[in-house]
Image (tube, rainbow, N blue to C red):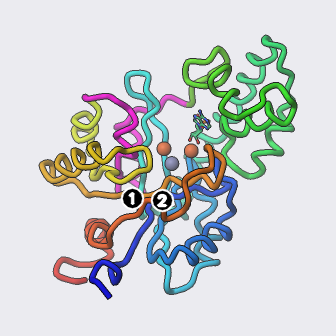
Amino acid sequence: MTLDLLQKKADLHIHTHFSDSLLSPKQVIENVKTQGLDTIAITDHDSILGIDEAIDCGDKAHEIIPGVELSTIFQEIDVHILGYYIDYRNEDLVRYLTDLQHFRENRARQMIEKLAKYGIKLEYDLIRNIAQQAAVGRPHIATAMKEKGYVSTIDEAFYRFIGYHGPCYVPKKEIEIREAIQIIKEFGGIPVLAHPGVYECEELIPKTINDGIEGIEVWHPEHTRRCTERLLLIANEYHLLVTGGSDCHGGRKGGRVLIGQVCLNDCYVRELKRRAGIIKNGEF
Ligand code: AMP
Ligand code: FE
Ligand code: FE
Ligand code: ZN
């Protein structure tokens, strides 16, 4: 057996149905077991509700890092910040995230009003029903549009109506990158810039470093090999932690990316743990 096969593998970017994945935390863990992953992170958008269920369904062979993915705004771009090892049981954090979710609910209602002007009639209850206990987002609205026959694909809902440049798009709560980083740190988490390669914004990495980011997501399904290599060099130069993962949405977002399809070598996970104080310097 080669050393590579002995190396532990991690997927540090996984969604559940508590945000916009179709998989329950239990189904996520079943996938993790079949993929033979050693470490995963649950990183739902604006929600920590999937973490306990994932931990309950896991066993000692699989380490589950509590995480979250917050949305921020920079130069009108929706920039995502991951927070690892966040104190997800903290009541103040839960309150903060609940506020974000209420904002998302109002935003969904505003999008429904805009869609009505285009002859698309949706009841909020249908969207709530699709989202169930999740932080409601555009994927749920797109699903409702498809179910009602207004569009034939989810993609069509995005490019014609609710995509970033669509006529019915409504932004989320406008949190500054600096605020998201501070919130994550305040609750004991490690802030990491999610998928920097998708933004095509040169100023973003220097800006987030200036705002106190501690790591960047280097491995991501939407990163090219060239982009990954460049991000590794940047991480090295600025002494940033390196993370990566599948960003699996369990079939919601096109459905092609599977849990563990993009994964991270354990040496990077150990660095993350050192930063979180979970393992001490010199320990393995
Ligand atoms: P929201 O957080 O409500 O703004 O929704 C953002 C989510 O929509 C992203 O995390 C993706 O999962 C999904 N999404 C964005 N663009 C598309 C697209 N073109 N097709 C399908 N899903 C998309
Ligand atoms: Fe998502
Ligand atoms: Fe993201
Ligand atoms: Zn994500």
* Front one among 146 and 182: 146
Instruction: Give the numbered dot on residue 189.
Output: 1
Contact between marks 2 and 1 (CB within 8 A): the answer is yes
171 w.r.t. 182: above or below: above
Q: Tag 1: residue type?
A: Gly
Q: Residue 182 in the image: x percent, y percent?
A: 36, 45
Q: Range of the magenta residues?
A: 173-202
| Beta carbon at label 2 within 8 Å of ligand 4 | no
Residue 53 placement, left or right of 84? right
Q: In the image as oriented, which residue stretches furthest toward the front?
A: 1
Categorize mark 1 by other alpha carbons within 10 Å: few (<14), some (14-19), many (20+): many
Residue that mark 2 sits on: 67
Of the 4 image quadrants, the one containing the C terminus is bottom left
Residue at horizontal 49 percent and vertical 85 percent from the top: 61
In which quarter of the view is residue 205 placed? top left
Residue 230 placement, left or right of 185? left
38 w.r.t. 118: above or below: below
Residue 189 placement, left or right of 226? right
**Earlier residue among tags 2 and 1:** 2
* Front one among 220 and 189: 220
Categorize mark 2 by other alpha carbons within 10 Å: few (<14), some (14-19), many (20+): many
In whole angstroms, how far apart are the C-alphas of marks 2 and 1? Answer: 8 Å
In which quarter of the view is residue 32 placed? bottom right
Residue 180 in magenta?
Answer: yes
Residue 205 placement, left or right of 71? left
